[in-house]
Amino acid sequence: MSAELRSRRNVFAGLALDRCSERRPDHAWLEQALHAPETRFIVLDPDGKALLTADLRHLRELDRVEQCEWRVESAPTLLGVDENQAAHFLLAPDAPTALRVAEAGGGQFMDLRSAGLVLPAFEAGLFAYARGLAHWQARTRWCSACGSALMLEWAGHRGRCSNPDCAIEHYPRTDPAIIVIVTWRDACLLGRQATWPKGRFSTLAGFVEPGETLEDAVRREVFEEAGVRVVDSDYHSSQPWPFPSSLMLGFTARAEDPTIKVGDEIDEARWFEVDEFVRDVESGALGLPPPLSVSWRLIEHWLKQASGLELSELKSPSTWR
């Protein structure tokens, strides 16, 4: 399976959307799209929760009539056009308006972590995209160069300093972070934070630093967290992770030596051989990250490669946590 196909299986990465970046400065096209009958509007409240249908199975996107009728007056941000040529826009109203819209439309607001496990792939990806953009808009109000107010333009995807002597353009930021499944023979390396539920382990991860390649970040993070030297790191897949603005870059890597020396960043690190891993998962002694995370996909990849077993088929006594 190609890396592209592996990425598409990750939650939030199944968004088949033309982002229409070339259309963002085209005011005539934007105005036409805003008034088209097939256009839909995703609604996010100030906490970044999206409006879902009452059964919490789908996004409750508004049509243009509902937007006008319920007086949702926040500036629309273009997200893109789907395969049916319907445009999707983001609306981020204030809290009272969001509550009024939910009551009028018979929907409920849900956070992204919860919604990501129940929404169809396209809708989960659209929510993640909208949330990341809304977070940037809400928290990037002032020019970092001169302190003047920013004006949103380019259909909500760019901020421009209002000071004519500055006029610097500001764009949404994305913070790259590596996440890696490290192997030694048929074992995998997992670590845990002290604040996690008892028995929960996950793959190691960390942010990429300036001037650093992704492979260097893999080597550095694994050594900093677990004291393990790794070689042969290979790209696996990627996942948008708007909590608030990360891009998770998944890797596999092989340990040069299995000796563990835990650093200051995690509480514990352990090698899990296949038999021990399966036994502990099925007994409930080992808790894993939920399928929401690319970490789950990396563990799934290792287990399949090492034993031919499917992670989703293991009989855990509790839901993935």
Image (cartoon, grey):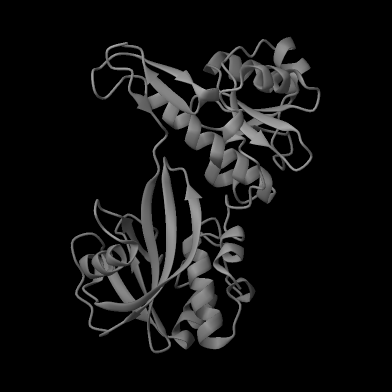
Q: Nearer the viewer, residue 263 or 26?
A: 26
Query: Does the rendering let one see residue 263?
Result: yes
Residue 225's image quarter? bottom left
Image point 58% across, 52% down: which residue? 13
Q: Position of residue 34 (x, y in %)?
A: 70, 20
User: Is 127 left, or right, of 255 in this rendering?
Assistant: right
Give above or below for 91 relative to 149.
below
Q: Position of residue 285 (x, y in %)?
A: 45, 73
Query: Does the rendering let one see residue 289?
Result: no
Q: Nearer the viewer, residue 143 or 59?
A: 143
Quarter the N terminus occupies: bottom right
Q: How many marks?
A: 0
Residue 291's image quarter? bottom right
Residue 276's image quarter? bottom left
Image point 25% across, 71% down: which residue? 226
User: Is 141 left, or right, of 22 in this rendering?
Assistant: left
Give above or below for 16 relative to 182.
above
Give above or below for 231 relative to 79.
below
Image point 24% across, 54% down: which residue? 211
Q: Position of residue 307 (x, y in %)?
A: 54, 87
Give above or below for 315 relative to 117.
below
Q: Position of residue 146 (x, y in %)?
A: 23, 18
